[in-house]
Image (cartoon, rainbow, N blue to C red):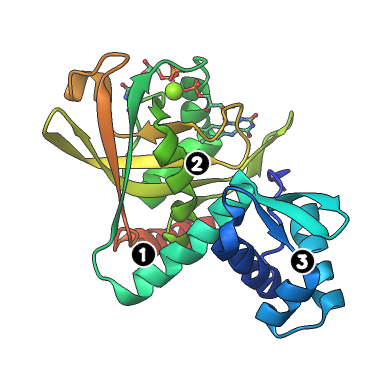
Amino acid sequence: MAEATSTADPDPAAIAALKHVGLVGGLTETKVSCAALGDRLDASTQTASRRLQTLESAGYIERDVVGDGQWVRVTDAGEAALRAEYADYRRLFETDVELVLRGAVTGGMGEGRHYITLPGYAEQFRTRLGYEPFPGTLNVDLSEESVRRRGEMAGIDAVPIDAWEDEDRTYGAASCYGVTLVADGERYEEVHAIVPDRTHHDDDQLELIAPERLRDALDLADGDAVEVRVAATSRADAPENEAEMETEVA
Ligand SMILES: Cc1cc2nc3c(=O)[nH]c(=O)nc-3n(C[C@H](O)[C@H](O)[C@H](O)COP(=O)(O)O)c2cc1C
Ligand SMILES: Nc1ccn([C@@H]2O[C@H](COP(=O)(O)OP(=O)(O)O)[C@@H](O)[C@H]2O)c(=O)n1
Ligand SMILES: [Mg+2]
């Protein structure tokens, strides 16, 4: 299987503690006492202390212990976990929620083309997305705000692309989110944001695939501003395609 980039156990009790830390100012930095946190969580001081330890080892908070308490900061990973919760609630109570990520077109490492055309991926794109992608990924350098907001993608249904292997090595899994790409007022609908489990890029790069070369279709050059609108639900045909895939494999 893919050696997935570490995702901590989303223990609901730890997330509840993280929410409280955020609410008392932890998204910047705040002083927390385990007794006060325990009160807010309706739990003992020891339990509150354990929750903070769990959050720290999951990489969701950083802390400096001082004499009368501790200074706690929610990390980027912690904020992403909170935003994923937030996205779930938005989906519960709002309809047609769209996540809009903004950034600029950029060149990457020239590897996207290689991965997109590997047979183990290409066949899955064909059956699950319903098209053969242009060989490559259009890379978008996300704005700071969008880097923070991309955590909300965790609450949105994606088309899964499975890990696979050939005789030499294993290839990681990926998730494909149906998106609309908007540039200079023009919209291009048949696009997916592809998020590989293993990648050389940081969170600030979002990679897009489409049947066509998007630089041509939307007349894009490096530095051009784009909007990536992520639909809150997956494309209606995705599960059907998956069923087709299983039938083919069987
Ligand atoms: C479908 C897909 C699967 C990938 N699988 C792997 C992988 O198994 N191992 C790996 O190191 N990188 C993998 N990558 C990520 C590439 O290493 C790299 O981060 C990125 O795609 C490079 O794109 P660029 O040339 O546009 O910069 C994958 C990328 C895609 C699009
Ligand atoms: N659907 C797509 C996919 C890639 N591309 C572009 O096609 C080229 C090859 O993609 P790539 O991922 O191998 O290269 P880089 O993104 O690393 O530059 C790049 O210039 C991408 O921006 C595109 O315009 N439309
Ligand atoms: Mg690319």
Which amino acid type is marked by label 1?
Glu
For the residue carrying disc 1, how many other residues have a C-alpha within 10 Å: few (<14), some (14-19), or many (20+)?
A: few
| Mark 3 or mark 2, whichever is nearer to me | 3
Q: Which residue is pictured at 70% across the width and 85% down the height? A: 42
Which amino acid type is marked by label 3?
Ser
Residue to which mark 3 is pinned: 33
Decide which of tag 3 and tag 2 comes sooner along the chain. Answer: 3
Whether residues under marks 1 and 2 lie with C-beta atoms below 8 angstroms apart, the answer is no
Decide which of tag 3 and tag 1 comes sooner along the chain. Answer: 3
| Mark 1 or mark 2, whichever is nearer to me | 2
Q: Is residue 15 above or below residue 83?
A: below
- Residue 240's mark? 1
Decide which of tag 1 and tag 2 comes sooner along the chain. Answer: 2
Q: Residue 153: x and y, percent?
A: 44, 53
Q: Is residue 11 above or below residue 29?
A: below
Mark 1: which secondary structure? helix
Answer whether residue 250 is visible to the viewer in this image.
no
Q: CA distance from mark 3 to mark 1?
A: 51 Å
Q: CA distance from mark 3 to mark 2?
A: 38 Å
- Residue 195's mark? 2
For the residue carrying disc 3, how many other residues have a C-alpha within 10 Å: few (<14), some (14-19), or many (20+)?
A: some
Q: Residue furthest bottom?
A: 42
Q: CA distance from mark 1 to mark 2?
A: 22 Å
